[in-house]
Image (cartoon, rainbow, N blue to C red):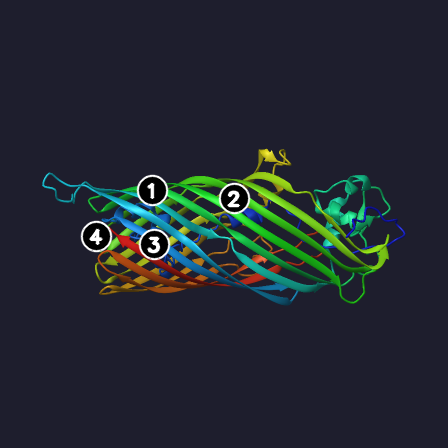
Amino acid sequence: MKSLKSISLGILLSVFCSFLVHAQNEQDALRYSRFFPYTTARSLSLGGAMGAVGHDIGSYSINPAGIAVNRYNLLSFSGGSLQTISSGNYAGDISKANRLNNNIPSMGIVLTGIQYDEKNRPVTNGLANINLLFSYNRNTPLYDDYTYSGVNSQSSVADMFAQQANGQSTGDLNTNFADPYALAFQTGVIKSSGTYGQYVPAFVENASNPHPQFLQSGQNTLRGNVNEFTLGLAASYGHRWFIGGSVLLQTVRFRSTLNYQEEDINNSATYIKSMAYNQKLFTSGSGGGIKLGAIYRLNDLVRIGLSYHSAIVYNLTDQYSYNVSSVFDQAINGSTDYSSPSDQQNFGYHIYRPARIILSLALVKEKRGLWSFDAEYVNYTNGNLSANNTNSVQPGYDFKQENKTITTLYKPSLNIRTGGELYLGNIFLRCGYAYMASPYSNRSAYAAAPSSRHLLSGGVGITSKYHSLDFGIGYMVGKDYFTPYSINTLPYQSAIVEKQSYMMMLTYNYKF
């Protein structure tokens, strides 16, 4: 495959490929701000409503005060699977994709320090116990596969590349192997309009020509996790007040492969047969924060909990590359196929993940069962991006436009979780429901379509003196949005991706 460096104005080219040019943007801020507290079979079964419950590794991730509820040492390990079926609606056409991921959602240990009086009896008034937690939780899975396809006669990704190239000389574009719009020029997807520094798609002959009709399609593959490592400490005062806190380190590993194609399906584009744009991205980094919480046992039945998750600043590095290719109806300079890959690039930046507050209520009846409720508040408009000046190809970039978009696109959200547990001897039956509100504001283009998520879950647990085994299942439905490209002057399409997620989890607990 060749790279078409220059073509005379008398020759019409083209084809191209494409997708949204990679940039750290509002979608990145939202991706790392989601919180899914379903990291054990019990927490999944109860819909994640564990803030005032305790006795579970998943509960401690929500409210660290629950660590002190334990009166025994606990070792816990969970394994699970996540199957996601995605249906992408793009320009009225629907495409489907299916993905299965097996994972380890959590593991941890709680060491209990029970206080004794002078007669070697456990203290019931004052400081009763101090407990220590070491745990791992996978609170934000980033696995996804989806495809989309549809016919568009109003715009092309080539229109976006031409707009981005405006203001630059042809010499600069021929030597630029960093930006996709330059690769588009090198492969003949865009061309000079005849005016210095102005570019148009290669299929444009004159302003009166109707826009060609393209079959636009894409395949996106996402893989990764936000993993949380926690050191927690909590104390019980008279088994009525439980106060706790934790220090956490979150690590980010995320890979994505984005493939986008446009094909002239009825020979309406001069010289154009097809074009493609590919992007590979690997994101890595970490961030730290704290969680603080309290649980008050009003009486033997009622518990009230409150927890605070601090904001987290992730220090991230993106490694990414592009490729633009084109196929012509007729040979140009001896070839019909052209391709131009970019250089491997690095970009260092920070993402500010907003803080969240969780209010919890639990009704616990000894040896009968429980009902639990959590309400979580998070303000997505507080998300923020900034450049890492020590590890970036653009150390002076200020992200003003992206941060302005965050405040316009998103809003504060209230997420609700509830669940119940019935105790039948040594067997527990559980069910739960969770509602994750849409993060999009009424000013967002996505506000017209619902983008909330709903979880229905259930499970069973078997316990003995030293061992317990929990099994949980969950079904989550929701929507995401994906825009292959955007243009200021022409209409463009977004894919509405409807998701169905099936979760299964098994947790083993050893009490000692």
Which of the two marks, 1 or 4, is nearer to us in this view?
1
Question: How far apart are labels 1 and 2 at the CA level?
Answer: 26 Å
User: Considering only order in the chain, which callout, 4 or 3, is on the residue closer to the N terminus?
Assistant: 3
Q: Which mark is residue 379?
A: none
Relative image position of residue 436 (x, y in whole percent): 45, 57
User: Which percent across, then down, holds residue 29?
Assistant: 54, 46
Q: Earlier in the sequence, mark 2 or mark 3?
A: 3
- Left/right of residue 403 with respect to residue 215 in the rendered view: left
Q: Is residue 383 left or right of residue 3?
A: left
**Which residue is located at x 40 percent, y 41 percent?**
248
Q: Residue at position x 77%, y 42% from top?
A: 173
Q: Which residue type carries mark 2? A: Gly
Q: Callout 4: 10 Å neighbours few (<14), some, many (20+)?
A: few
Dot 1 surroundings within 10 Å: few (below 14), some, or many (20 or more)? many
Q: Earlier in the sequence, mark 4 or mark 2?
A: 4
Amino acid type at mark 4: Asn
Give the residue furthest to the top: 390
Left or right: 119, with 83 as reference point: left
Secondary element type, mark 1: strand
Of labels 1 and 2, earlier in sequence is 1
Residue tagged by mark 2?
Answer: 383
Q: Secondary structure at mark 3?
A: loop
- How many badges with numbers are in the image? 4
Task: Indicate the quadrant where residue 458 lies.
Answer: bottom left
Residue 50 is labelled as 3
Tell me which amino acid carries mark 3: Met
Q: Earlier in the sequence, mark 3 or mark 1?
A: 3
Instruction: Find out whether the residues at labels 3 and 1 contact each other: C-beta distance under 8 Å.
Output: no
The residue that mark 4 highlights is: 299
Camera sees residue 141: yes
Residue picked out by circle 1: 232
